[in-house]
Image (tube, grey):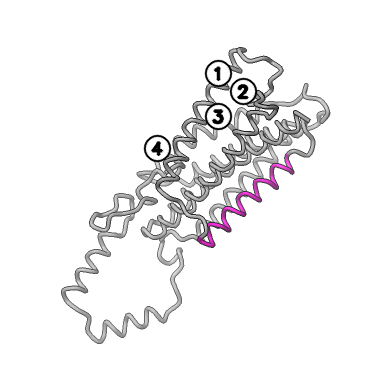
């Protein structure tokens, strides 16, 4: 599992011999019902009742109080709505009333506040969701992420006009293609590839932390705006090479997110767990957008 948002038994493949451990797990009742049918058999009345149930319209997530793909999609759309509203606030807060050709008056408060608040809330949501899903915390996370996205996007837009539109279109394209390939069945997660991507993501995390430390301590030259990413190999920026690999990792993470949401639906997870699925997708998409934003900035900065 690559996305910490899905660190819950509800999204993991269940052993049919065991009872699931997440709140509201339906396996115990289902097992008892199955045993009852096996030992007692079904009479004519039961057969008629079952036929009526199959003929009736399918119950939705509201009626069953169980997680569904459609309900998770709506929850995801709602979270991104909150993110976009907060992003507008962060954008206006950062650039309101200043000269777009100058960085002197750009406020970094929305960027830093959003990043810190989003990180703290992501950790709280992750470590508490095994016992209870708290949608209010997820709403707050979306708002803080919106401040972060709005702030960092405004900063980059001042540096490279038009970059936000480019990064947004590229992000939508990657997400759309990944979703289409997954929905068609042409792309699926595998254990071997997941292990490879997990190792690569861990290595990338170490590289990113090291880069930040070197930049903060002044070890790297000040002319390198992105630190180690600005270094060149055979005339190609290191950030561009790494960025392409990171976009692939983010896209594969989306595949894992979709797969684990489907697993949650198959497990009969409670409807509220759809918020965790939406939260996981948001984490991955925000990561993807920031990486694409940096890739375009590096390319345009070298031209």
Residue 6 in picture, x, y percent from top left: 43, 45
User: Mark 3 or mark 4, which is nearer the start of the sequence?
Assistant: 3
* SS state under label 3: helix
What numbered label is drawn on residue 213? 1
Residue 149 in picture, x, y percent from top left: 64, 37
* SS state under label 4: helix
The CA span between labels 3 and 2 is 23 Å
Side (left or right) of 3 relative to 86: left
Side (left or right) of 274 relative to 230: left
* SS state under label 1: helix
What numbered label is drawn on residue 116? 3
Return the residue at label 2.
Answer: 228
User: Mark 1 or mark 2, which is nearer the start of the sequence?
Assistant: 1
Q: What residue span does the magenta drawing correspond to?
A: 164-185
Return the residue at label 4.
Answer: 127
> Foreground: 45 or 300?
300
The CA span between labels 2 and 1 is 11 Å
User: Mark 1 or mark 3, which is nearer the start of the sequence?
Assistant: 3
Residue at horizontal 49 percent and vertical 26 percent from the top: 206
Q: Dot 2 surroundings within 10 Å: few (below 14), some, or many (20 or more)?
A: many
Q: Is residue 226 above or below residue 279?
A: above
Q: Is residue 199 above or below residue 172?
A: above
* SS state under label 2: helix
The CA span between labels 4 and 2 is 32 Å
Place residue 194 in its image quadrant. Answer: top left
User: Mark 2 or mark 3, which is nearer the start of the sequence?
Assistant: 3
Residues at marks 4 and 1 touching, judged by CB atoms closer than 8 Å: no
Quarter holding the N terminus?
top left
Q: Dot 3 surroundings within 10 Å: few (below 14), some, or many (20 or more)?
A: some
User: Mark 2 or mark 4, which is nearer the start of the sequence?
Assistant: 4
The CA span between labels 4 and 1 is 27 Å
């Amino acid at each position: 599992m690559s996305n910490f948002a899905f660190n819950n038994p509800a999204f993991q493949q269940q052993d049919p011999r065991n009872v699931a451990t997440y709140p509201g797990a339906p396996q115990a009742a289902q097992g008892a019902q199955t045993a009852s049918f096996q030992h007692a058999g079904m009479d004519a009345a039961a057969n008629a009742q079952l036929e009526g149930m199959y003929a009736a319209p399918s119950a939705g997530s509201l009626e069953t109080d169980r997680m569904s793909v459609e309900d998770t999609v709506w929850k995801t759309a709602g979270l991104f709505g909150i993110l976009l509203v907060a992003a507008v606030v962060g954008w206006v807060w950062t650039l309101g009333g200043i000269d777009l050709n100058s960085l002197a008056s750009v406020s970094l408060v929305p960027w830093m506040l959003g990043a810190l608040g989003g990180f703290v809330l992501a950790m709280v949501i992750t470590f508490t969701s095994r016992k209870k899903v708290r949608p209010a915390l997820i709403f707050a996370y979306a708002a803080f992420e919106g401040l972060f996205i709005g702030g960092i996007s405004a900063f980059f837009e001042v540096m490279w006009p038009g970059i936000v539109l480019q990064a947004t279109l590229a992000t939508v394209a990657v997400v759309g293609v990944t979703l289409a390939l997954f929905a068609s069945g042409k792309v699926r997660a595998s254990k071997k590839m997941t292990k490879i991507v997990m190792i690569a993501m861990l290595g990338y995390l170490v590289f990113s932390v090291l880069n930040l430390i070197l930049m903060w301590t002044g070890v790297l030259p000040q002319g390198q705006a992105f630190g180690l990413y600005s270094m060149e190999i055979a005339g190609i920026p290191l950030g561009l090479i790494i960025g392409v690999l990171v976009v692939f990792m983010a896209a594969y993470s989306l595949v894992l997110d979709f797969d684990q949401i489907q697993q949650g639906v198959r497990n009969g997870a409670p409807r509220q767990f759809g918020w965790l699925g939406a939260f996981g997708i948001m984490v991955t998409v925000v990561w993807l957008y920031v990486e694409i934003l940096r890739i375009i900035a590096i390319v345009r900065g070298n031209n």
